[in-house]
Image (cartoon, rainbow, N blue to C red):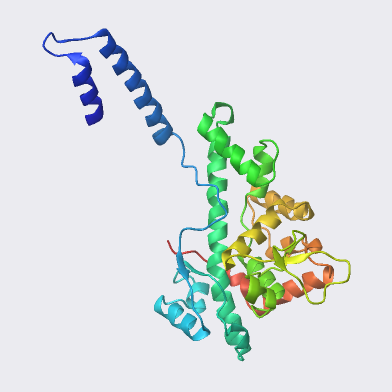
Amino acid sequence: MKILLRVINRCCNWKENLPSPIGLLTIAQFMGLFVYFFIQNNLTPYLPKISSSFSEGKSISVKTTEELDKVFLKYNYHLKDIRNGTTRVPFLLLEKLPDNFHKTKEIEKRKKLFIKIVLPMALAVNRKINSYREALLTLSKNHNKLNKREQRWIHSLSKQHNKNSIEIKSLLDQLAPIPVSLFLAQSAIESGWGTSRFAREGNALFGQWTWKSGSGIIPKNRDPGETYEVKAYKNLISSVWDYAYNLNTHWAYSDFRKERSNGINSGRELPVIFLMKTLKRYSQRGQAYLELVENIIKQNDLLSLDNSKLAN
């Protein structure tokens, strides 16, 4: 309002108590801009930034598992408390696995550490996905009355999810969270609970392939004539995001998205084990792989972490 008063004072002849014609025009233009930006900033719903990077949370870099233990202790991060719902998961994002992580001899200790590493990342990825979904649901209520800013945002979101046209229903099918227990079980299998060369050298927790030469790590047992590499990432959460993005966009997992959407639209939560059965194409091992995922979930009580919450 102070800016508006300055414009009025400059454009009006207060001695004669009458604005000049140019002053009236300037005031009208300014008021129009003021109303426009007010509507854009106050009446338009919050639209989260579309990005695959994560600026929130506390980035953690440690050299050893002993250092990591101290960090978790400092933040009172205990899986028992998370499972019984008494505390939230600290928003800690480990950049890369400790150098000696794969040398941890106590298997149960290594598995617990691995779960504590991946859990906040899985929740952070789901939080981002949910923020997109909630904004899109709000905009879909006034689909025919969207302003240019809202249209650009939906277009950018569609482009990010490989959509050539704006199809809100189809986009909503892709924008839904992944069960936390699936994040944990599949990352454990694909990375050998964080001990694989791909996890240590390329922050690759899910063993995803790429055919872009030089963008990944060449497997030592790759068959002659094959050109794929295991995709490498700048940090661990980039791998976790890419896994969710893969499930939410790739044609091979359309059944997974369909069943998940059916559950959401009917107001019922589908069992993770049921959803998991739609991921038969994730591995060349097929049904044997799905049975392994189910066993990992049950043996490590991962379902108890599905409803865990991320600290702000």
Report the residue at 73% width, 50% height from top: 258
Q: Position of residue 238 (x, y in %)?
A: 59, 62
Q: Position of residue 13 (x, y in %)?
A: 16, 12
Q: Position of residue 200 (x, y in %)?
A: 63, 76
Write down the quadrant of residue 90 in the picture: bottom left
Q: Can residue 44 be seen?
A: yes
Say left or right for 135 vs 269: left
Q: Is residue 163 above or below residue 69?
A: above
Identify the image quadrant of the N terminus.
top left
Nearest the camera: 142 or 247? 247
Write down the quadrant of residue 227 in the picture: bottom right
Say left or right for 2 vs 309: left
Nearest the camera: 85 or 214? 214
Q: Is residue 19 above or below residue 245?
A: above
Say left or right for 78 vs 104: left
Nearest the camera: 196 or 282? 196
Q: Position of residue 296 (x, y in %)?
A: 70, 76
Nearest the camera: 311 or 275? 311
Q: Can residue 1 be seen?
A: no
Report the residue at 69% width, 68% height from top: 206
Identify the image quadrant of the C terminus.
bottom left
